[in-house]
Image: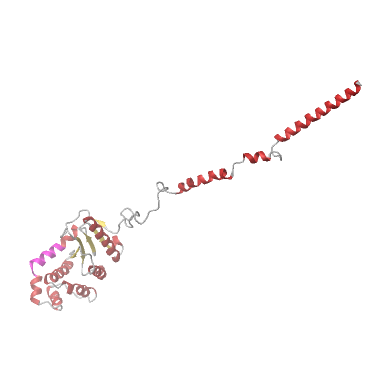
Amino acid sequence: MSKNFLQIGLIILILAVLAGVSAFFYLKMQKQPGSEAAAPEQTTVTPPAAAVTQPIAEAAPAQTAALQPAGESTAPAPTEQTAAPAESPAAEELTGYETLATPQPTQNPDKIEVIEFFWYGCPHCYDFEPILESWVKKMPVNVDFIRQPAAFSDLWAKHAKAFYVAQALGVLDKVHADFFDALQNKHQKLETEEQLGAFFAAHGVKEADFHDAYNSFLVDTKVRQAAVTPARYGVTGVPVLIVNGKYKVDGKSAGSHEKMIEVMNQLIKKESAAKK
């Protein structure tokens, strides 16, 4: 009888040990990462899709801002009303001229004065003449245009005298282009009183009227002024344009005869705006 109880107790003990061992291995398997039982727990702690993508969505503006100039990251695109003017002093710098060290007074402060220094014997002045004349025919109404012969030598002074004689007789428009042509293309000698008298007579001027003007105090005074006036504007060669007593434009500064006209027009606009 006692032997049966011992066998039964041993069996129960063995079963208990086996149960304990089974429980131990079961719990150990539950704690091992990478097992099939661990997968559901990892799924539950995985952030939702929105939580994963949110940091990327928030980072995008920061990357964009880093590529934009400072102060413009939040500015709206300008509309037609708020857009800056196409031509602003800060955006475009005017070039092609020199500013006179000492500005010179103009004849009429209410107008923009343009002076052309020239010499009839200058081939560059001859080439520039048709370009300038085209501008003169359509120049702004607020511009005073003055032709100013330069007298850097006796020969230049003789040709300057022809200019002032024509001006005094009121025939400058009639003889100006022809005087250029006579010197540049026909190579005529137009220096003495007799030579010039013949030229003016061919353009319908009475001989007596020519000699009176040629020997007048007014013409003589203007020729003397033509010898000293260029220095006031720093002019040492021709052709040169002086805009409103402040700016000097020539082929060297502007780059070409056509550019001289463009630069002059820009300076006229600048001076006109300053008067408003």
Estimate the x, y position of residue 56 in percent, counting from the top left.
53, 45
Estimate the x, y position of residue 59 in percent, counting from the top left.
51, 45
The residue located at (15%, 63%) in the rendering is 226
Q: Is residue 12 above or below residue 224?
A: above
Quarter occupied by the C terminus: bottom left
Q: Is residue 50 visible?
A: yes
Quarter occupied by the N terminus: top right
Q: Nearer the viewer, residue 257 or 35?
A: 35
The residue located at (11%, 70%) in the rendering is 168
Coloring scheme of the render?
secondary structure
Queried whether the magenta region covers residue 151, the answer comes back as no
Which image quadrant is residue 213 in?
Answer: bottom left
Queried whether the magenta region covers residue 223, the answer comes back as yes
Which image quadrant is residue 266 in?
Answer: bottom left
Q: Is residue 237 visible?
A: no
Bounds of the magenta segment: 215-226
Q: Main secondary structure of the magenta part?
A: helix
Q: Is residue 192 above or below residue 36?
A: below
Which image quadrant is residue 91 in?
Answer: bottom left
